[in-house]
Image (cartoon, rainbow, N blue to C red):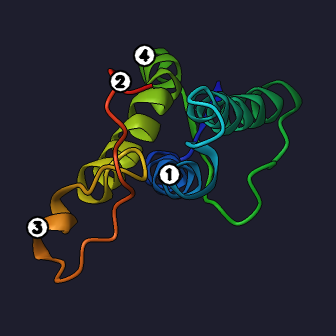
Amino acid sequence: MSLVSPVDAPVVFVCGMIAAVIYRRWLASRNEDWFLFLGILVVGVFWVSLLVGTVGNLPVRGILPVVTTKSVLLAVFFPLAYPFWFWTGAWAIFLLFGRRPEQGGVYWLYRIEDRTEDYEPSWES
């Protein structure tokens, strides 16, 4: 018997969107590996929560509804899809606003004023 929450995927999707905004705004200029660290942190928290809830039979997710299932396939493959949902949420934000400060994304087409940072070509550095 295992615990599976039907709102885990949308919550991980939204966490991916929030992590993408945090990465683009504050962390992208420091190091490109910060996004990987944020992804591992968010997905790891959900996996540890799932593991503690399954082993200890504890409702560790707080207000999120938890469904007990006897399907082994659902119990295994649903949590394995958490990295996919995280990356899909982040990809949506990166598509709209760009991955780095010098990229504009799709939203750049609809701006009147260009607010992207200047791009330094590699041959000048």
Crowd band around label 4 with a 10 angstrom C-alpha radius: few (<14), some (14–19), many (20+): few
Residue topped by disc 1: 24
Q: Could you tell me the amino acid type at mark 4?
A: Leu
Give the left or right position of residue 45, taking residue 26 as reference. Answer: right
Residue topped by disc 4: 73
> In the rendered structure, which disc, 3 or 2, sits on the residue that comes first in sequence?
3
Residue topped by disc 2: 122
State the SS at label 4. Answer: helix
> In the rendered structure, which disc, 3 or 1, sits on the residue that comes first in sequence?
1
- The Cα atoms of the two marked residues, 3 and 2, are separated by 25 Å
> In the rendered structure, which disc, 1 or 4, sits on the residue that comes first in sequence?
1
> The N terminus appears in which quarter of the rendering?
top right
Crowd band around label 3 with a 10 angstrom C-alpha radius: few (<14), some (14–19), many (20+): few
Which mark lies nearer to you, 1 or 4? 1
Q: Farthest residue in the bottom direction?
A: 112
Residue topped by disc 3: 109
